[in-house]
Amino acid sequence: MSLTKTERTLIVSMWAKISTQADTIGTETLERLFLSYPQTKTYFPHFDLHPGSAQLHAHGSKVVAAVGDAAKNIDNIGAALSKLSELHAYVLRVDPVNFKLLSHCLLVTLAARFPADFTAEAHAAWDKFLSVVSSVLTEKYR
Amino acid sequence: MGAKGEYYPSKLIGKVLKIFCISNFVFDMVSFHRLLVVYPWTQRFFDSFGNLSSPSAILGNPKVKAHGKKVLTSFGDAIKNMDNLKTTFAKLSELHCDKLHVDPENFKLLGNVLVTVLAIHFGKEFTPEVQASWQKMVAGVASALSSRYH
């Protein structure tokens, strides 16, 4: 699955808008993830996950920054996220099913904040893009 | 979810449900159309629908509109029978298995598209808490629809 030119343009142009709210988008995405899919909290026993927690905010920023890196290097996501891919494979070992859950929650966050931009085509492009990012992050698992 | 698997709609979901029922024609069209655009392989079940070659073709297709209405009316039934989903969807489950041969994975895809469409329409009001209620709902519907598969 690779992104078409149109899809890449869509992602990159939307990212420009999104990046201005990157921090709060990250926090909201994680809040949605932990509420809708409580089993994902098992990866964060060491975190304070209450709304407003500094750790939640910091981690949300990290996640969205990584998505941003992928968007800014959309022609070579594999290279851009190579270190993160190793981290997930050898250290974090988050079960692959969870990438879909996080991607969905990020999509919902974007849809709620940018309703006019989130056309069916944009929705398709983002879903595909996040799917590519997820593949890159799990490609070294075994 | 309660001990016996029943749902506890919070007052948050109640507000969204009221609006859903009034304007469900919007969600009908939009969610089903989006499913076919975002996950094009779902078109495999709709060869008889005619032109599905582009997002605008799908949007303008009268059969897609009609089918979207059918599907989302079912969601309306789900909302009215939240404590009894398996019974409510028993016949539909058999239909999807024996006649339509639909992979239950598709029920999850539609559920998530519906959640995304709700987020677009309700924006800030579609809080993480409201989303969580809806995720339970769509998961319940997906599970009920696959309960008679064999």
Image (spheres, helix red, strand yellow):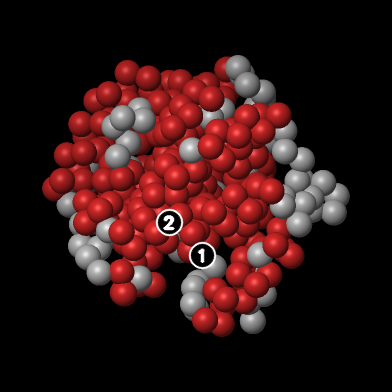
Evaluate whether residue A119 shows in this view: yes
Image disc number at residue B68? 2
Q: Secondary structure at mark 1?
A: helix
Residue at the location (49% across, 23% down)?
B124
Q: Quadrant of residue B54?
A: bottom left
Label 2 crowd (10 A; few <14 / some 14-19 / many >=20)? many
Q: Which residue is mark 1?
A: B105
Q: Secondary structure at mark 2?
A: helix
Q: Amino acid at mark 1?
A: Glu
Q: Quadrant of residue B74?
A: bottom right
Evaluate whether residue A102 shows in this view: no
Q: CA distance from mark 1 to mark 2?
A: 18 Å
Image disc number at residue A36? none
Residue at the location (49% across, 38% down)?
B23
Asked whether the beta carbons under mark 1 and mark 2 sit within 8 Å of each other, the answer is no
- Residue A35 locus on image (x, y percent): 64, 36
- Residue A13 locus on image (x, y percent): 20, 31
